[in-house]
Amino acid sequence: MLRRRPGTPTLEEVAALAGVGRGTVSRVINNAAGVKDTTRRAVQRAIAELGYVPNLAARTLAGRRADAVALVMTEPDWRQFGEPFFSEIVRSVGDALTETEVQLLLTLVRTDAERQRLVEYARGGRVDGVMLMSVHATDPLPDMLAEVGLPTVLLGRRSGDESVTYVDADNVGGARAAVSHLLDTGRRAVATITGPPDMNVAQCRLRGYREAMERAGAEPRESWTVRGDFSADSGHRAMAELLERAPEIDGVFAASDTMAAGALGALRAAGRRVPDDVAVIGFDDFPLAQHTDPKLTTVRQPLDEIGHAMVRLLLEEMREPSTAWRHVIHRTELVLRDSA
């Protein structure tokens, strides 16, 4: 027999405190008709006092659904939510759900306390599934959700050994194509501005850079790699640092369009012409890429397809829970414009 966790209140304890039967508590939890207002308030007070959370598995077995899914952003730095990537994914996921009866809830989870609150919220049956974006390597939230049996899909992955269903782009191949293009067009000192090292997406794009350099016999120097955080400000700072310590560079691969846009500003401030003196390539193909000066050559990742795939996998998991996780990786495409 399964034993409940010490200190976890039960339905029977709620009923005893409220002075009603177990069935009445169930009707209140499920917002059923036929319960007096005074009784309903008594049960709600007991639930609040005991901190009772309805069991998600029991609700599922009973065939009841919340008809809602959560899109959870786990980026600890709130400033990142102003970057185009987040708004593009929210739009894509929202579009994919428009033909369904499922409500989309958007929430931020950045601390241990917020993680625990989300798990308890999910255990209470308030959402039927969760999509997570911007998950860092050591984030335990995907595993916490898996432990309570909630269908979960990640945008990207924490590592190459991810054990939760995810949708991703071919970050290694996209970065490799970008750097190979720079080398094929005569650039010899190609630098890179990377993302945060605790994010798999940044590691993969750095790996693609290194693979392209090695295949071309162009050994990358340590001074040619500077870390950013996917923001425009970090791209500007990183580019200024590169120009100071490696003035010979004639090509730059930035691991996001926003960092590439920041790099263009730093190059302009330093009097370097793009692409004559330094060619620049980004990654994402946000609308921003067509409004920079010059227009940005970039690696397109199909965010519409990625968002729709996340929704499809989540809805399938909600309908028929699977014991195996699924991994979907979308192709990328190099889009040539004026900056390279």
Image: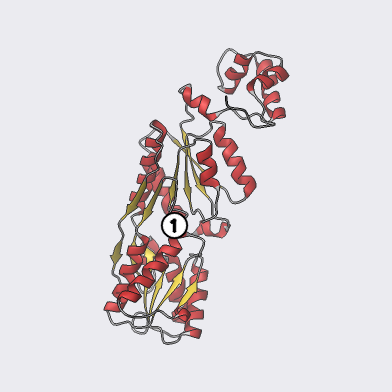
Q: Is residue 96 above or below residue 258?
A: above
Q: Is residue 11 above or below residue 200?
A: above
The residue singled out by tag 1 in the image is: 85
User: Percent position (x, y) of residue 141?
Assistant: 54, 46
Point out the image quarter for the N terminus.
Answer: top right
Left or right: residue 22 compared with residue 264: right
Residue located at (47% from left, 54% from top): 158
The structure's colour scheme is secondary structure
Question: Which one is nearer the viewer's eye here, 5 or 105?
Answer: 5
Q: Quadrant for residue 333, please give it.
A: bottom left
Q: Quadrant for residue 281, please give it.
A: bottom left
Secondary structure under the numbered disc 1 in the rendered image: helix
Question: Which one is nearer the viewer's eye here, 196 or 72?
Answer: 196
User: Which residue is the extreme one toward the left?
Assistant: 184
Point out the image quarter for the C terminus.
Answer: bottom left
User: Percent position (x, y) of residue 87?
Assistant: 45, 53
Identify which amino acid the numbered label 1 is placed on: Phe
Left or right: residue 20 compared with residue 241: right
User: Percent position (x, y) of residue 226?
Assistant: 49, 74
User: Percent position (x, y) of residue 290?
Assistant: 35, 66
Q: Is residue 120 above or below residue 159?
A: above
Question: Which one is nearer the viewer's eye here, 34 or 184?
Answer: 184
| Numbered disc total | 1
Q: Is residue 339 visible?
A: no
Q: Is residue 218 visible?
A: yes
Residue located at (45% from left, 23% from top): 63
Q: Residues within 10 Å of mark 1 (few under 14, many from 20)?
A: some
Q: Quadrant for residue 51, please give it.
A: top right
